[in-house]
């Protein structure tokens, strides 16, 4: 990364500085949510790895989603807890850059994983006779690797580019993790080109997978409406319901808040909205998939019995 005269030895993440009296209570709440996230997603990873009944493409991609959520939570939440309990604790530029790198890569990976999971449901419902041949183990692993690596080039370029701008004091980041928008407010240079390119990349990363999800579910809906059996329709829709709930939760907040590098609302509001896709969604995903899925509950029962 480039050096400049205005470079700061550390950044201060001003996590919920507007409510200082609530910081200890928020730290306890976020710690509980963090532990639930690790436990829930960890159980999903163990179940889908251990139980042969769950060795199918759908649960393979669910395991990848759980792993992404674990990586994302480990990257964001521990630093958030440190900043809530020790407000003056600084963060080095390298640490901030690494955190932003993992955040951007994880968000991108999750977008593409949700699209792949929707396509998997489309093939299972619309082309059931060819499902095994299409969703081969090789293809599943290639898709998983592609999803994991999809965000690496973009996150590397934007992280290196942003951290080569000159930063001017004060160096307090009005957010609870290193993200593009709050860091841009500290830059004392023209960032117009950077913001335009970030906006284009964000639209592509968010909207391309979302369009694939929409097209997949339009095909699923058309196929389901053609089914003569009410039982078949319910079974087909039930396999998609959990995924649709996760998509709505994820895109409902993450898509809106990242469509502009500099948000038009206050940093305090952004922190509240960001909690949804950084903490609430990762915590709820295992519950959504397990509570609505008989196979997952059965696998959990078998694992508990052993």
Image (spheres, rainbow, N blue to C red):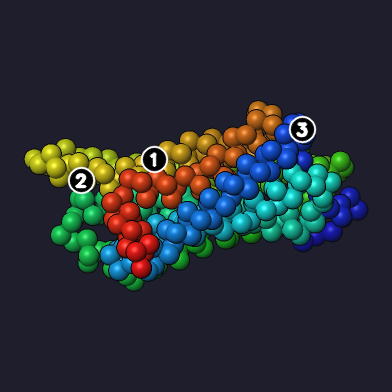
Q: Of label 3 and label 1, which has the lower sequence position?
A: 3
Mark 1, other Cα within 10 Å: few <14 / some 14–19 / many ≥20: few
Q: Of label 1 and label 2, which has the lower sequence position?
A: 2
The percent position of residue 202, horizontal first and vertical second, equals 55, 45
The Cα–Cα distance between marks 3 and 1, rounded to whole angstroms, is 34 Å
User: Are the two marked residues, 3 and 1, in contact with CB atoms closer than 8 angstroms?
Assistant: no
**Mark 1 = which residue?**
245
Q: How many marks?
A: 3
The Cα–Cα distance between marks 1 and 2, rounded to whole angstroms, is 16 Å
Q: Of label 2 and label 3, which has the lower sequence position?
A: 3
**Mark 3 = which residue?**
21
171 or 27, which lies in front? 27
Find numbered disc 2 in the image and state the secondary structure of the residue it sits on. helix
Left or right of residue 5, residue 163 in this image: left
The Cα–Cα distance between marks 2 and 3, rounded to whole angstroms, is 49 Å
Residue in view at x 34 percent, y 49 percent? 118
The percent position of residue 263, horizontal first and vertical second, equals 65, 33
Residue in view at x 34 percent, y 64 percent? 305
Left or right of residue 269, residue 43 in this image: left
152 or 297, which lies in front? 297
Please identify the quarter of the rendering in which residue 180 is found. Answer: top right
Q: Quadrant of the N terminus?
A: bottom right
Find numbered disc 3 in the image and state the secondary structure of the residue it sits on. helix
Residue in view at x 31 percent, y 49 percent? 293
**Mark 2 = which residue?**
235
Q: Quadrant of the C terminus?
A: bottom left
Please identify the quarter of the rendering in which residue 190 is found. Answer: top right
Q: Nearer the viewer, mark 3 or mark 1?
A: 3
């Amino acid at each position: 990364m480039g050096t400049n005269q205005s470079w700061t030895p550390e950044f201060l993440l001003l996590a919920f500085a507007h409510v200082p009296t609530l910081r200890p209570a928020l730290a306890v709440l976020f710690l509980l949510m963090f532990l639930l996230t690790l436990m829930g997603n960890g159980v999903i990873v163990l179940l889908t790895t251990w139980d042969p009944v769950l060795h199918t493409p759908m649960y393979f991609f669910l395991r990848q989603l759980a792993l992404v959520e674990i990586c994302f939570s480990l990257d964001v939440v521990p630093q958030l807890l440190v900043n809530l309990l020790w407000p003056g604790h600084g963060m080095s530029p390298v640490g901030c850059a690494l955190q932003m790198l993992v955040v951007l890569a994880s968000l991108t990976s999750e977008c593409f994983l949700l699209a792949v999971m929707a396509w998997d449901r489309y093939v299972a419902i619309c082309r059931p006779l060819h499902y095994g041949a299409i969703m081969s183990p090789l293809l599943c692993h290639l898709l998983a690797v592609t999803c994991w690596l999809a965000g690496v080039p973009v996150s590397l370029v934007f992280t290196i580019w942003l951290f080569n701008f000159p930063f001017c004091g004060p160096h307090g980041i009005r957010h609870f993790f290193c993200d593009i928008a709050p860091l841009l407010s500290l830059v004392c240079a023209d960032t117009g080109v950077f913001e335009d390119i970030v906006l284009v990349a964000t639209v592509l990363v968010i909207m391309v997978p979302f369009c694939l999800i929409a097209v997949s579910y339009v095909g699923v809906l058309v196929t389901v409406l053609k089914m003569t059996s009410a039982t078949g329709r319910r079974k087909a829709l039930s396999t998609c319901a959990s995924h649709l709930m996760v998509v709505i939760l994820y895109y409902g907040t993450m898509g809106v808040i990242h469509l502009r590098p500099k948000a038009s609302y206050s940093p305090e509001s952004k922190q509240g909205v960001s909690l949804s896709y950084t903490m609430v969604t990762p915590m709820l995903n295992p519950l959504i998939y397990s509570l609505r899925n008989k196979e997952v509950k059965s696998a959990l029962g078998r694992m508990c019995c052993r």
